[in-house]
Image (tube, rainbow, N blue to C red):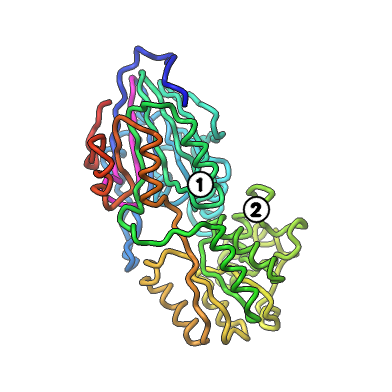
Amino acid sequence: MPTIKNFRNLEVSPMNITIHRGSHQIGGSCIELSAGNSRILLDIGKALPSLDETTLDETALLPGVKVLIDKKAIDAVLISHSHGDHVGLIGQVKPAIPVYIGKAALHIYNTTALFTGGKTLANPTFFFESGQPLKIGDFTITPYLVDHSGYDAYGFLIEAGGKAVVYTGDFRDHGKKAKATEYFKKHLPSGIDALLIEGTMMSRSTEALETEDQLEDKARELMQSSNQPVLVLQSSTNIDRLVGMYRAATRSGRLFVMDIFTAHIVSQLAPSIPKPSSSFDSIRVIYPFWLTRKMFEKDHVHLMNQFSRYKIKREELSQRQDYCLLFRPSMLSDLQHIDQLEGAEMIYSQWSGYKHQKKIKAVLDFADQKTMTLTDLHTSGHASTQALKAFIQQCNPRMVLPIHTENPDGFLECGNRVYLPQDGERIRL
């Protein structure tokens, strides 16, 4: 592996790291790096809601972060990916502060905002190119595409003042972009000063982590063995899962149905991603009643008409059984107006913990009323404990700083290089 050398800014003071949030919790990530006269933020996420769906008051931004962005003392905010627990508070960042993000990740963020009534990103934006360094003040930052359930996710190598830090963002090595994570690891310099590594699975080590390809094979077997409709409860932004379900459906001779929101999510992604188009003739689009009504009331006529040629009505779905329908809990009322769902197959493809939420319970109760067969097919968007340890071993940093974890102590077995900071603590390299 290459070594760290030839720094241009040796006069810059050593780097400082402050984890404003995330040292002892999953989600709400926000990290500050400073060197010389430069400061950047890595992610600025919302805290995850509790399973009882208690509304969180996030109007008061983290004090340390608020001071920085109010004074415009931040040179830039770097967003690792479009999940809300990493980008959810970006709307509070002053419009003059530039934001760096993946191009597809920004599309997903802005599309979600349009359909949910949120604000699209107003800041000047710059896009990552994997493996291509960029300069922000005294920092040289090299983004690397990584495998994650969030599409267009990045980890970073950050260099300044003769110091080097790696931030993994959220990552894994068992998805459809596993090679991206491996490329990231292989291209990191040896002897980095600090590794900021996510540790979601440190508190979920008993969860089985199948690969996305294994899930796809199981979904295909299920769809081929059934002559009933197949309903898949999953996130619209989990693109790996969507691709797997599409392949399973088409290989089983099924029509693949997504809703208008999901259609817009995938519309601007890579050409290989299934989307309503002439290239994917087995895809149709359902228009959820309440979402459609809301969008027309907001005069988003163009958005709603963009895929009208691929529209499939609930009446048509009621007359056929050869389809696979992706849906979200908000579409329950639409399912209730589709006939011939008795005995259908339902695939639950989300974290099992969400089953305790009221909206998910309502869907599962509906499935029970219709005597559907419920099958759990899911794997985490985060690295297993074995993958985390392997990353640390290969990266061989001088210091390991866990983040995005409820169990930072789980990293202690990786040796005395592990340091467990508190939120708000400044670490000088």
Secondary element under disc 1, as helix, strand or loop, is loop
Please identify, in this view, whether the residue under mark 1 or under mark 2 is nearer the observer.
1
Which image quarter: residue 39? top left
- Which residue occupies the foreground of this view, 89 or 129? 129
Q: Considering only vertical position in the picture, is 411 above or below 340? A: above
User: Percent x, y for residue 18?
Assistant: 28, 35
Separation (CA) of disc 1 from disc 2 = 15 Å
User: Percent x, y for residue 418?
Assistant: 26, 38
User: Percent x, y for residue 98?
Assistant: 47, 33
Q: Amino acid at mark 1?
A: Asp
Which image quarter: residue 258? bottom right
Q: Considering only vertical position in the picture, is 296 above or below 410? A: below
Q: Is residue 422 visible?
A: yes
Residue hosting label 1: 147
Earlier sequence position, callout 1 versus callout 2: 1
> Is there a contact, CB below 8 Å, between mark 1 and mark 2?
no
Which image quarter: residue 303? bottom right
Check disc 1: other Cα within 10 Å, few if <14, some if 14-19, many if 20+.
many
| Residue beneath the point at 34% across and 12% down | 11
Q: Considering only vertical position in the picture, is 333 above or below 59? A: below
Residue hosting label 2: 273
Q: Is residue 27 visible?
A: no
